[in-house]
Image (spheres, rainbow, N blue to C red):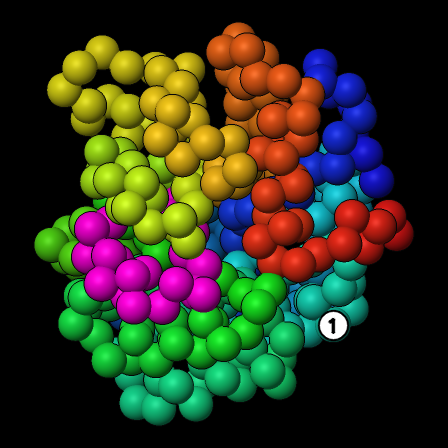
Amino acid sequence: MKKRTIFGEIEIYDAHAHFFSRKFFETLVSQSPHLSREADSIGRVAEMTGWTMPPDDPAELAAIWKEELDRHGISAAMLMASVPGDEDSIAAAVAGLPQRIIGGFMFDPTKPDAEARARRSFDELKLRVACLFPAMQHYSMAESEGARAVVALAGERPGTAVFVHCGVLSVGARKKLGLPSRFDMRYSNPLDLYRLASEFPKAQFIIPHFGAGMFREAMMLADLCPNVYLDTSSSNNWIKYDLAPVDLSTVFTRALAVVGHQRLLFGTDSSFFPRGWQAEVFETQVKTLAEIGMSGEQAMAILGGNLRRLLGIAEKQASS
């Protein structure tokens, strides 16, 4: 499947989207003393958020995502289970639509049996991207034995990657439901990955949102470690924190100067319905790439080719 763009027809692979399963919302409900007492807690969540609640069966949610990707002409997306322990939901989605959904899983390495749990996700469930949120679970990437075990496993498995959220972290669903977000920003520095990225050069790392406010540190890390990729996802509102005037064109230009076009991964950070896939994020980024003089070949790499290469996905896989 190819999408018509100002660069021509291109296979688009979204490197960053969220699979908000039924279990995702049930987990949030369990963390709220008020919602957990509601007779129809999921219905109450729908009222509070304005979002469409997913069906019980994750395969049905996968089918909804397929229709959404079809509607926008998107070949495939990396959809991540968005609470720890929801690996089976995204695995069911991948099993039903392996050519359209690339499985990612939010992973808490501070819990027991980290290596065994990560091994199961990679080997049994056929998930490709372990998604780590150090500020959320309060651990250092430089010091966590659980994180090290996950990275070591990824380094032994071509076609996998370790996604590490750095910088500013905000979870919209938690805000809408009035849940506290007791994140620890001390663990958000991309440079904390340097030790593992150096020790495991065969492991591939993805830093989302250009570092989400820690752009300079993310660029330093990527410059030093050729196994580090940056994803371009979301609105990139972190730009407002930059001390000097900057816009998305400047961000792309600086990133390209340091890491080149082959280590940038297009993403939207799409998540809930009825909003669905964020076409406006795509259009903004494509326009920006054109404005800064990207060639068609370079745009093809950023918008899909780099993720296919990183995860060893053949282009023809996404044709159905």
Seen in the picture, residue 291 relative to 88 is either above or below; the reply is: above
Q: Residue at x 67, y 26 (%)?
A: 297
Between 189 and 313, the one nearer to me in the picture:
313
Q: Residue at x 24, y 40 (%)?
A: 220
Q: Residue at x 75, y 30 (%)?
A: 10
Q: Residue at x 40, y 35 (%)?
A: 259
Disc 1 secondary structure class: helix
Residue 238 appears anywhere in the view:
yes
Q: Inspect the magenta stretch and tell me whether residue 196 lies in it.
A: yes
Q: Amino acid at mark 1?
A: Ala
Range of the magenta residues? Answer: 190-208
Seen in the picture, residue 122 relative to 287 is either above or below; the reply is: below
* Residue under pointer 1: 95
Viewport quadrant of the N terminus? top right
Where residue 146 appears, as percent x and y from the top left, is 29, 79
Seen in the picture, residue 140 relative to 284 is either above or below; the reply is: below
Q: Quadrant of residue 112?
A: bottom left
Residue 199 relative to residue 298: left or right: left
Where residue 128 appears, as percent x and y from the top left, is 57, 66
Q: Quadrant of residue 167?
A: top left
Where residue 83 appears, as percent x and y from the top left, is 42, 67
**Mark 1, residues whose alpha carbon is within 10 Å: few (<14), some, or many (≥20)?**
some
Q: Inspect the magenta stretch and tell me whether residue 238 lies in it.
A: no
